[in-house]
Amino acid sequence: MKRYHDLIVHEGNQPLVDALEMSVLSLLAGTPIHVHVEGLRGTGKTTVVRAMKNILPSIERIAGCWYNCDPGNPHCPIHRNLGPEDLSLLGTESVSVPFLEISHAAKLGTVVGSIDLAKVVDPNKPEIALLPGIIPRAYRGIIFVDEINRLADTSPELTDVLLDVMGTKPGRIQVEETGLPTFTLPVMCCVWAASNPDEEPGALEDIRRQLSDRFDFVVNMGRPQNHDTVKKILCGHAASDESLWPQDRGFVPQKAELLQRIALPDELASVLAELYVSFGIESLRAVEAIALGARARAALDSRTRVLLDDIRGVLPITLRHRVDGATLINISKFLDEYESRHGRPREQDRLPENSEDDSDEGETSSHNPRDLARRGDNFMKPDSLWDRLMRGIGLIRPDVSRASRNPQQRGLASCAGSSGGQRGHGEHYATGEGTSIADPKDIDICAPPGKAKSLFQLAGGDILFTEEDLRIR
Ligand SMILES: [Zn+2]
């Protein structure tokens, strides 16, 4: 199994690495982010997921508790009714954040819980007791479900269990066994899942849309696109020197603590409210996921302030399974327009790495090479596929993103309308008026040579050109 620092991070798997890191922070901060990664077989989805075990820190639990009871807030049927004195007699122990897997062939009993046969047949003290299943034992940890589309297709009862687990934060699970009283447990864990939508039975959102919506993030796993990356993967070592990774586990709790302190600014909450209402987004979970994802992205980048760019950075992974492509583009335009009216964040909005008033965050980030890489070009840049797509629309009408950021040159003026107020502004884009398609006959379109690939596999710069790009060519 590859370790976290052995991972070769490239343009295809970077979004997954970022999403899982945000998920780990969210778990420690008490509001788990559920992540589903989709991709073709052999792209290394499960390798990345399992490598994340290396950054999972330790947690304190009541000694010997299979349910991982927090000593300060026990939840399991054995410990939740004990007083502080009884609890202190039990003592505590430190264990790694649990990471448990559910296969598509799993049985309900092993996932939820079943009668503990060893205790039933114990000749000295026979008793009926429950053997907790994977989900109760993953409390404060991570559950990984590989091939979740197959599980949803063949095990409707397990799917229903996952719907309960992921329906609220924390979720819940009901345990029923003949001969034992039924009881309900809270479930506080992240669910990570992987699937290949190109194989039977198809994409999860087509099989069980309700379960697909339970995932806060859906990430598309891409292939490495260049020669050097593939070579590094073949050689089996990451570019980073292992000695640079002294605290793989250390940066996680610090940034999780930072996440707990970060609030979504009121003006960005208004933007999300407007986005939800005007674009008729079906699930409230979508905007909740954007809000939490934006905060986690700021924490991962060692900032205390959430920026509009954080919202942009998580839009594709929070909305691609919830809205169609045209709506996503119109939402992106809506944010462009918002930004052109309110301006880009000032430089001082970004915290200096070692500023006096935020020195702890500076330290948090300074030792982790992945942080340094993240500050480069790869960290879920807002200038991602959808931004490039937006610029690509510049082929068929004036360059949208650039024009909208510069009111003097805006060809978008008629699209943006004259409304100065914030509320209701998104309705204009929601109706699709932000999209105007020119006559294709009037446009020179440069098609890339070579074999066709899926949209998510392509680097946008290879296929989409702005008018300026074309002039240079
Ligand atoms: Zn317990």
Image: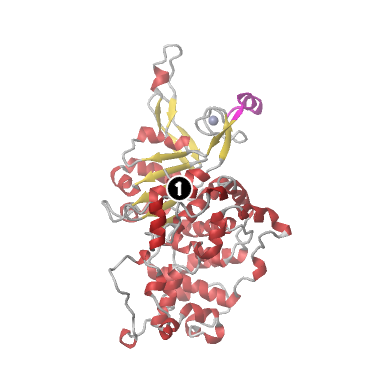
Q: Which x, y percent locates residue 138?
A: 47, 38
Q: Quadrant of ligand 1?
A: top right
Q: Nearer the viewer, residue 393 or 208?
A: 393
State the residue at coordinates (56%, 86%).
Answer: 408
Q: Work out whether residue 294 can be spotted.
A: no
Q: Give SS at disc 1.
A: helix
Residue 323 lies in what quarter of the image?
bottom left
- Identify the image quadrant of the C terminus: bottom left
Give x and y (percent) for residue 12. 41, 60
Near-viewer residue (241 or 61):
241
Residue at image coords 41%, 12%: 123
Specify whether residue 338 is painted magenta.
no
- Relative height, residue 52 to residue 356 (above, below): above
Asked whether, in this view, residue 140 is left or right of residue 231, the answer is right
Q: Which residue is mark 1?
A: 167
- Residue farthest to the bottom, as pictured: 442
- Please give the name of the residue rendered at 32% of the width and 44% of the height, measured from the top-left corner: 151
The image shows residue 446 at horizontal and vertical percentages of: 34, 80
Q: Quadrant of residue 43?
A: bottom left
The range drawn in magenta is: 81-92
Inspect the magenta stretch and tell me whether residue 86 lies in it. Answer: yes
Three-letter amino acid code at the position of disc 1: Gly
Which residue is more in the foreground, 113 or 357?
357
Identity of the residue furthest to the front in this view: 235
